[in-house]
């Protein structure tokens, strides 16, 4: 057994994750028509549980059908509870040690206009989202209730906790942004904007008073466009993390036991959210965001970091033999190197893998057993992102032939994509 920091256990609230590799939340558009897990969903999670990560943040799951961005998204409404209970029990039988927490989401203005409706919280729409309806307290009260119902059902189905999603440009983020500038209950002054997340946390804990049920959020620390989360004001792109720091400190006071750092918004600033080999250096910014959260929070609040897939085994090529990263030796630039170093340096407590968990669901186990040579490293081709954008079933189109075929079919039917944003 490895003695590396990555493979040491970590306490999250009253539970203990056996190691510090987290599977990031990855939606795959393959639920049954009623939102229950399909055979494809089962297969994916069965492999992930067998692959021995410490934590799995379940993919985005919706507690309502009016404002969604994926046509075949998993849902967590009352009718899904029996199927989800069976799903979780089955996975826990495979590996009872993994901490499993689904991500409850609401899409707001980035709902898909083809099959859903967009709502926004600003008089002046964010450019590109003019086809949305302005909502206020009444509708947002329903959104909070949806988050609470979704979280309560996560408890009922036997999940270890919940990710109350506050990242990647979804509704929780839309409310936090300086761009949410009108003066209303959850808009204008920072104290109003942060109150939405605080109310969600308070009401979720009230609905599930069991402290063994872990509450946390994936948070975009800086969205990277004017008026986005982590900017100076509604019209500025200048990074200012004062509000983000206050947010996590407030949420910690209201019961947050863990936070999963992210950045960017795949609908607007995709490369910041999913570091890409053409702009590989962006990935280092995630380390800074992790440290900002780590420094702001109590030691017992667990900080998990995103954006680690790009480091692979240290060999990242843009094309041909051209290296994506300069000024660093490959052996000092792998996911294993940075995971261990960042944990040892107090930058972060655990690291997550997103796309790498598609490329090889057994990555944690292989790393733990020093079988790195057997790992199928993600090539960062982003074909899986293209499948997601086009609403096809998602998987690794490089290493899994079934998804290579779906990818080819997608290109044939749609002509592929011109712009890479969700
Ligand atoms: C196909 C696909 C689906 C994703 N689904 C989600 C999701 O459901 N929720 C979420 O917060 N992030 C989602 N993400 C973002 C990832 O969780 C992660 O933040 C991002 O890929 C960066 O991590 P990586 O560099 O390890 O891939 C998705 C990314 C991809 C490529
Ligand atoms: S499709 Fe490409 S980017 Fe996506 S997981 Fe596979 S190798 Fe990685």
Image (cartoon, helix red, strand yellow):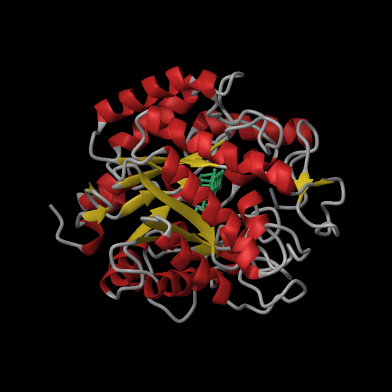
User: What count of labels does the image hold?
Assistant: 0
Specify the quadrant of the image occupied by residue 319.
bottom right
What residue sits 58% from the left and 37% below the top? 146
Residue nearest the observer in this picture, 412 or 155: 155
Position of residue 230 measured from the top left corner of the image (x, y, whole percent): 61, 71
What residue sits 41% from the left and 62% below the top? 253
Residue 167 seen in the figure: no
Position of residue 200 measured from the top left corner of the image (x, y, whole percent): 53, 48
Residue 19 seen in the figure: yes
Q: In this rendering, is residue 170 above or below 286?
A: above
**Left or right of 124 on screen, residue 207:** left
Position of residue 212 measured from the top left corner of the image (x, y, whole percent): 29, 43
Q: In this rendering, is residue 101 above or below 237?
A: above
Q: In this rendering, is residue 203 above or below 173?
A: above
Position of residue 220 measured from the top left corner of the image (x, y, whole percent): 56, 61
Name, please, the residue furthest toward the bottom: 327
What residue sits 21% from the left and 53% below the top? 370
Q: In this rendering, is residue 83 above or below 407?
A: above
**Left or right of 104 on screen, residue 53:** left
What residue sits 67% from the left and 79% below the top? 238
């Amino acid at each position: 057994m490895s003695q590396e920091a990555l493979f040491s256990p970590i306490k999250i609230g009253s539970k203990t994750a056996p190691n510090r590799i987290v599977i990031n939340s990855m939606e795959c558009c393959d639920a049954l028509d009623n939102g229950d897990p399909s055979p494809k969903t089962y297969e994916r999670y069965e492999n992930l549980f067998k692959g021995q990560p410490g934590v799995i943040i379940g993919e985005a799951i919706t507690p309502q059908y009016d404002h969604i961005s994926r046509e075949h998204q998993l849902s967590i409404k009352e009718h899904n509870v029996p199927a989800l209970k069976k799903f979780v029990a089955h996975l826990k039988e495979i590996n009872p040690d993994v901490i499993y927490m689904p991500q409850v989401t609401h899409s707001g203005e980035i709902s898909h206009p083809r099959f859903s409706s967009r709502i926004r919280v600003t008089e002046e729409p964010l450019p590109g989202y003019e086809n949305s309806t302005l909502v206020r307290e009444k509708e947002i009260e329903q959104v909070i209730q949806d988050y609470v119902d979704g979280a309560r059902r996560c408890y009922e189905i036997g999940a270890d906790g919940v990710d109350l999603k506050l990242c990647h440009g979804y509704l929780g983020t839309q409310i936090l942004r300086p761009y949410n500038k009108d003066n209303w209950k959850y808009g204008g002054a920072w104290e109003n904007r942060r109150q939405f997340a605080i109310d969600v946390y308070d009401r979720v804990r009230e609905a599930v008073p069991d402290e063994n049920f872990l509450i946390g959020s994936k948070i975009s620390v800086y969205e990277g466009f004017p008026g986005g989360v982590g900017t100076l004001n509604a019209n500025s792109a200048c990074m200012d993390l004062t509000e983000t720091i206050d947010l996590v400190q407030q949420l910690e006071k209201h019961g947050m036991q863990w936070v999963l750092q992210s950045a960017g918004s795949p609908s607007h600033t995709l490369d910041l959210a999913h570091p890409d080999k053409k702009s590989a250096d962006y990935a280092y910014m995630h380390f800074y965001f992790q440290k900002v959260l780590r420094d702001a929070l109590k030691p017992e609040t667990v900080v998990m970091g995103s954006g680690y897939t790009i480091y692979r085994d240290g060999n990242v090529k843009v094309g041909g033999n051209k290296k994506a990263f300069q000024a660093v030796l490959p052996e000092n630039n792998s996911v294993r190197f940075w995971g261990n170093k960042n944990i040892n340096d107090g930058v972060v407590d655990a690291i997550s893998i997103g796309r790498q968990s598609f490329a090889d669901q057994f990555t944690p186990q292989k790393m733990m057993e020093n079988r790195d040579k057997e790992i199928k490293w993600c090539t960062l081709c982003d074909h899986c992102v293209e499948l997601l954008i086009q609403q096809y079933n998602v998987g690794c189109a490089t290493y899994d032939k079934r998804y290579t075929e779906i990818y080819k079919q997608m290109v044939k039917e749609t002509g592929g994509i011109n712009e890479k944003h969700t």
